[in-house]
Amino acid sequence: MFEGLTEKLERAINFFGKKGRLTPKDVKQGLEEIRKALLEADVNYKVVREFIKMVEEEATGERVLKSFTPREQILKIVYEKLIEILGKHEPLKLSRSPSPIILLGLQGSGKTTTAVKLAYLLRKKGKNPLLVPADVKRPAAFEQLRDLAARYDFPVYDKRLPDAVKLSKLALSMAVLKRYDVVIFDTAGRLHIDEEMIEEARKIRDTVNYDELLLVVDAMTGQDAVNVAREFQEKVGITGVILTKLDGDARGGAALSVRRITGKPIKYIGVGEKVEDLEEFHPERLASRILGMGDLATLREKAKEAIEAEHARRFQEKMLRAELTLEDFLEHIKQIKRMGPIEELIKLLPGGKEFARYADEKMLKKTEAIINSMTPEERRNPKIIDGSRKRRIARGSGTTVQDVNQLLREYELVVKLMKEMKKGKFPLRFPI
Ligand SMILES: Nc1nc2c(ncn2[C@@H]2O[C@H](COP(=O)(O)OP(=O)(O)O)[C@@H](O)[C@H]2O)c(=O)[nH]1
Ligand SMILES: [Mg+2]
């Protein structure tokens, strides 16, 4: 996947490694290399321009971490900006039962294969999908879907009608009746976009009250894929894109351009011919693949360490003085949250298990609300929090007195652990 791009970007990024300190001129020159790498990978020129601008602003800005070499800094920035350009992960919308999902796209883009792949992914999530061959013109299209689906025991709507719109309508009623919870429509493609195809897509769009109208595009076709996506977006309107054949020698241009050019999210990526070869799109994963993993893992580690070290130092100081306030407690929990893979870090924490619950988003919000409803005095000296204060705090934070009690108990537990640690009862395992 993206070998050419990975190699070229690596070379461009290594360019920054040669220098001890970077001058603005060095930065310009390095960026020029990155720009070339992206253009050669067939990334849309507007997207390239935007990307370079984003990287440049960040690279010459203040927010650079001092403990990083210039090469590491640029790698980090490029990684973050790739993620931004690729766009956010947006889960498939399944708002009702059955949820209709329409697949559109040119012939050969991978619609039929993707329909079955999607059914496969959805079944793994406990769904019961029905496949609908809405390409009524080519008998072979029906047979292809039927045969592929049969291998995995997926039900296929098998009524044959000359009208794709009528067929879609009937299939949908059948899905309601038989309680399928997702209906995937595999529509007719053409070699090129033409009016007839657009018209049919619009009709099906207007007939089926869809949850998703997904365009399947072949990533190997680079900017052509992006142009097709733009045209579909303009003429039919889509809710997202599925990029197929990213396993081949796709250069990366389609993947990196499609979100910016169409404004629509990439929802899935096809990474092989097999039915198992469809993945949910996650920008970090794709960006990691583009940049090569090993390098990034080291970088991530280092970034984490740099941030942790500072936080840990302050936290540790307070701990050793055994004067952790509720504010510190909250900051500490937030910090853990920010650092990602919670489980790993939890293990390193003093009183790790007690903290684990706070890593949960809801719990964190609650804790934050409770602490925010306290007066500064209460935060510094929780001992003064009596019954009436507890009631006030609970009311103010939209929680219950039990919630407040629980937080205070856990805080006390941590303070106790700290004291024990101070006495050397169990060893400090820092950072964090
Ligand atoms: N390597 C690879 N091949 C794919 C992928 N998705 C589809 N294909 C192949 O692309 C060809 C066309 O796919 P098909 O589903 O028939 O496209 P449709 O005409 O849009 O329905 C088939 O040979 C598929 O096996 C993918 O993600 N990777
Ligand atoms: Mg097909």
Image (cartoon, rainbow, N blue to C red):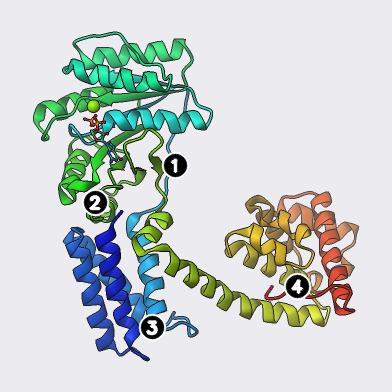
Q: Is residue 295 left or right of residue 238?
A: right
Image point 56% across, 72% down: which residue? 304
Disc 2/disc 3 C-alpha distance (Å): 30 Å
Q: Please tell me whether mark 3 or mark 4 is closer to you in this view.
A: 3
- Quadrant observed for ligand 2 in the rendered image: top left
Within the image, what quadrant is residue 147 found in? top left
Image point 81% across, 81% down: which residue? 320
* Mark 4 element type: helix
> Can residue 18 be seen from the camera position used here?
yes
The residue that mark 4 highlights is 376
Asked whether mark 3 and ligand 1 are closer than 8 Å, the reply comes as: no
Q: Residues within 10 Å of mark 4 (few under 14, many from 20)?
A: few
Residue 151 x %, y %: 39, 21
Label of residue 250 in the image: 2
Residue 146 x %, y %: 32, 17
Give the residue type at disc 3.
Pro
Q: Dots 2 and 4: beta carbons under 8 Å?
A: no
Give the residue type at disc 1.
Pro
Within the image, what quadrant is residue 3 found in? bottom left
Q: Earlier in the sequence, mark 3 or mark 1?
A: 3
* Mark 3 element type: helix
Between 313 and 98, the one lying in front of the other is 313
Give the residue type at disc 2.
Ala
Disc 3/disc 1 C-alpha distance (Å): 36 Å
Give the residue type at disc 4.
Pro
Disc 1/disc 2 C-alpha distance (Å): 24 Å
Label of residue 70 in the image: 3
Q: Is residue 298 left or right of residue 239?
A: right
Q: Please tell me whether mark 2 or mark 4 is closer to you in this view.
A: 2
